[in-house]
């Protein structure tokens, strides 16, 4: 049976997600930014938490773990490289591992860039990737610890997923990301339409998560570093896309 997925806001701009296997009743939270909204989502759905799958060790992704584990006895799975920083850890995973949530399964991809220990969970059969703080709707995470080359490689790998793959992100920065994307790529009609859609969603209390790989490839400036118009926006026309990516990311940090 296909996974059921619920997304909701946590803290100020984090996104919580629950992945439920209707066949076995297993249910995983992707990261644990905040206990309260996760409990509310569990109550509203009637799902029972069995697992927490951690994408990376940053506090706003792990600070709800202890309380949730105490309450539910759930299993905590986290990147091997983050093991010393994740509370309540039961299992570690690395590149090439498979994580099961009931009968659902996710491939573990190491996606360094935002931080050294970052991983993504690709539920291939369900066409859903939980990308944490690697990619955002119309944006990408800040680069720290790892190199720009690492981050670029992680983004290229995610961009290689099928266009219809749904992308679940760790934060909702869509409105701010859209402003930057329009500064980079002002003649992109698909981007203009999407930015307008993001504004409309905001007024209706919605957000554009999940996105899809196809939508991101068409509108996300960081995935479009290989486009001449995008390279031109940072004075890097003809340069390697990775160089363009770094220039874009540095511009976004100042934007
Ligand atoms: Zn983070």
Image (tube, rainbow, N blue to C red):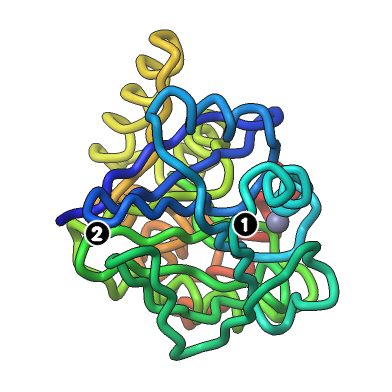
Q: Position of residue 231 (x, y in %)?
A: 46, 64
Q: Element type at marker 2? A: loop
Of all residues, the one furthest to the top in this rendering is 203
Q: Position of residue 55 (x, y in %)?
A: 60, 64
Q: Residue at x 37, y 69 (%)?
A: 122
Instruction: State the residue position of label 1.
Output: 141
Label 1 crowd bin: few (<14), some (14–19), many (20+), radius 10 Å: some
Q: Element type at marker 1? A: loop
Report whether 22 appears left or right of 98.
left
Does 209 sit above or below residue 66?
Answer: above
Label 2 crowd bin: few (<14), some (14–19), many (20+), radius 10 Å: many
Instruction: State the residue position of label 2.
Output: 165
Q: Is mark 1 within 8 Å of ligand 1?
A: yes
Does 22 sit above or below residue 242?
Answer: above
Q: Nearer the viewer, residue 102 or 117?
A: 102
Report whether 46 appears left or right of 128.
right
Q: Nearer the viewer, residue 224 or 4?
A: 4
Tag 1 or tag 2, which sits nearer the N-term? 1
Q: Residue at x 44, y 59 (%)?
A: 130
Q: Residue at x 39, y 64 (%)?
A: 101
């Amino acid at each position: 049976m296909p996974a059921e997925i619920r997304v909701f806001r946590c803290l100020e701009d984090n996104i919580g997600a629950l992945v439920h296997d209707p066949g076995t009743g297993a249910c995983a939270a992707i990261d644990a930014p905040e206990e309260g909204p996760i409990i509310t989502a569990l109550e509203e759905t009637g799902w029972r938490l069995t697992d927490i799958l951690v994408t990376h060790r940053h506090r706003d992704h792990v600070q709800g773990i202890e309380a949730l584990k105490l309450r539910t006895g759930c299993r905590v799975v986290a990147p091997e490289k983050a093991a010393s920083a994740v509370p309540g850890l039961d299992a570690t995973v690395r590149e090439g591992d498979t994580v099961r949530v009931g009968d659902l399964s996710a491939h573990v991809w190491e996606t360094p860039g935002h931080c050294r220990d970052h991983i993504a969970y690709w539920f291939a059969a369900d066409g859903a990737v939980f990308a944490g703080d690697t990619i955002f709707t119309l944006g990408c995470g800040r680069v720290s610890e790892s190199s720009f080359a690492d981050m670029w490689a992680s983004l290229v790998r995610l961009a290689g997923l099928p266009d219809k793959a749904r992308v679940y992100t760790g934060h909702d920065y869509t409105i701010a990301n859209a402003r930057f994307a329009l500064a980079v790529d002002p003649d992109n009609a698909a981007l203009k339409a999407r930015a307008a859609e993001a504004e409309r969603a905001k007024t209706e209390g919605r957000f554009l998560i999940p996105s899809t790989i196809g939508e991101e490839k068409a509108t996300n400036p960081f995935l479009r570093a290989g486009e001449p118009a995008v390279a031109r926006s940072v004075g890097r026309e003809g340069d390697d896309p990775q160089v363009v990516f770094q220039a874009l990311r540095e511009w976004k940090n100042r934007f």
